[in-house]
Amino acid sequence: MRDAVDAITKQWAAARPDVDVSPMSVVGRLSRASRLLERGIKEFFAEHGLEPWEFDMLATLLRGNPEHTMCMKDLAASALVSPGALTNRMDRLVERGLVRRWPLESNRRMVLVALTEEGERLAGDLLALHVANEAELLSALTPADQKALAETLRKLLVSLGDTEL
């Protein structure tokens, strides 16, 4: 079985036999797989009237604590977005009635965000469906393949500086 990355690395090997392009086999496949997985996830959420980032924000609040509340600073760190981008995202979710936001009385510079009942229901209802969609996207891999890939990717991510939140 061959893929597009095989063709690309074969072309490079012919064009530049003096360069070991084997790292392209891994990086190229990770990049292409990421784009294809993102497309599958985006299509799934579009069917449910959401953008992937919207579900990500709702799910972060849902799993964060029993009150489903976080300060904007922690939410930005968890979502890996700038404070400005987070404010824009929260504005959109507030408009949709999925979250509420308010300043902390003791420190008005700190802003809290919480799921509304509708946001909690939507995130909770979509979670199992989202995981089933991800399982379908990975269905070419056996459970053992998935476990080995997850462990290998964890090793790579840690080596690149990705750490616990």
Image (cartoon, rainbow, N blue to C red):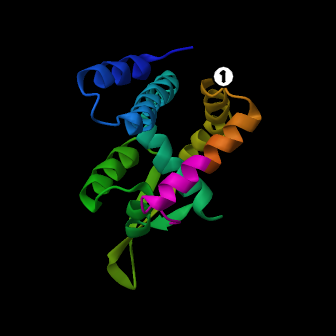
Asked whether the viewer can see residue 14, the reply is yes
Residue drawn 43% across the image and 68% down it: 74
Residue 60 at what x, y percent from top left? 53, 54
Q: Residue at x 41, y 28 (%)?
A: 32
Q: Is residue 153 magenta?
A: yes
* Residue 44 x/y as whole percent: 52, 25
Amino acid under disc 1 = Ala
Rendered location of residue 67, percent (x, y): 61, 65
Find the magenta span and give its range: 152-165
In front of the other: 8 or 113: 8
In this view, the residue farthest toward the top is 1
Q: Secondary structure at mark 1?
A: loop
Residue 114 is left or right of residue 126, and the answer is left
Q: Is residue 102 magenta?
A: no
For label 1, the crowd category at 10 Å Cα-Cα, with few meaning under 14, some 14 to 19 and many 20 or more, is few
23 to the left or right of 65: left
**In the image, residue 93 above or below residue 115:** above
Q: How far across and down, in percent of the image, does residue 97 sit?
A: 44, 45
Q: Is residue 123 left or right of residue 156?
A: right
Which quarter of the picture shows residue 63?
Answer: bottom right
Q: Is residue 116 visible?
A: no
Residue at label 1? 140
